[in-house]
Amino acid sequence: MGGKFLLRACMISFCCSFLAFVGMSTFANAEPQTNVDYEKWSRIAMDVVKLNYPESKVSDYDYKGREEITETQAKDTFEIKVENQTRAFIARVTILFNPQTNSLLSLSIEETR
């Protein structure tokens, strides 16, 4: 049990780091966006939930909004429906990022309901 959790945590960390690196190189020369653009973060949220729950059906994400924390930190929150053979629940994904560089700072997943 502990080995699988550690492997899953390492995979998620690697994927998040990779996605953050790709995002930084893609948007390094881009101007900061003033409109609410959460498409990139929704894809990352869905991918991380799929990695964390590989045997489950992942569907129906709901964008809960953005919180501007500082000039260099913003937080987007998503709720994603997860179903497997024994239960259904909502995974709340919180993504902290730098809106000036569009780089990922941290990501967390919390099961609700």
Image (cartoon, helix red, strand yellow):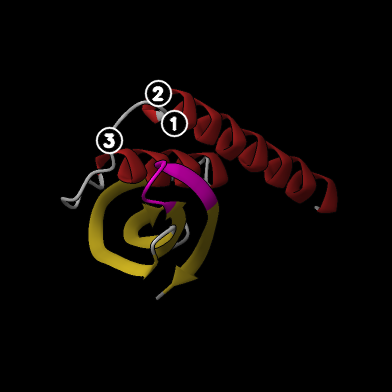
Q: Quadrant of residue 7?
A: top right
Q: Do the residues bearing badges 1 and 2 touch, measured as CB atoms within 8 Å?
A: yes
Is residue 45 inside the magenta stretch?
no
Position in image of residue 22 (x %, y %): 49, 25
Q: Which residue is mark 2?
A: 26
Which residue is drawn at the image coordinates 48% and 68% (left, top)?
A: 111
Q: Which mark is residue 23?
A: 1
Q: Residue furthest right?
A: 3
| Residue 85 shows in this picture | no
The residue that appears at 44% across and 57% down in the rendered structure is: 72
**Image x and y of residue 75, in percent:** 39, 62
Q: Label 3: which residue?
A: 31
Q: Is residue 84 left or right of residue 7?
A: left
Q: Where are the magenta residues, as a range?
A: 98-105
Determine the CA span between mark 1 and mark 3. Answer: 14 Å
For label 1, count other residues whose C-alpha is less than 10 Å away and answer few (under 14), some (14-19) or many (20+).
some
Left or right: 37, with 57 as reference point = left
Residue 102 image position (x, y, % from top left): 39, 42
Callout 2: SS: helix
- Rounded to the nearest angstrom, the CA distance separating label 1 from label 2 is 5 Å
Q: Secondary structure at mark 3?
A: loop
Residue at 56%, 39% (x, y): give it.
16
**Nearer to me, 100 or 103:** 100
Of residues 50 and 68, the one nearer the viewer is 68
| Residue 20, percent from left and from top | 52, 36
Q: Residue at x 42, y 41 (%)?
A: 101
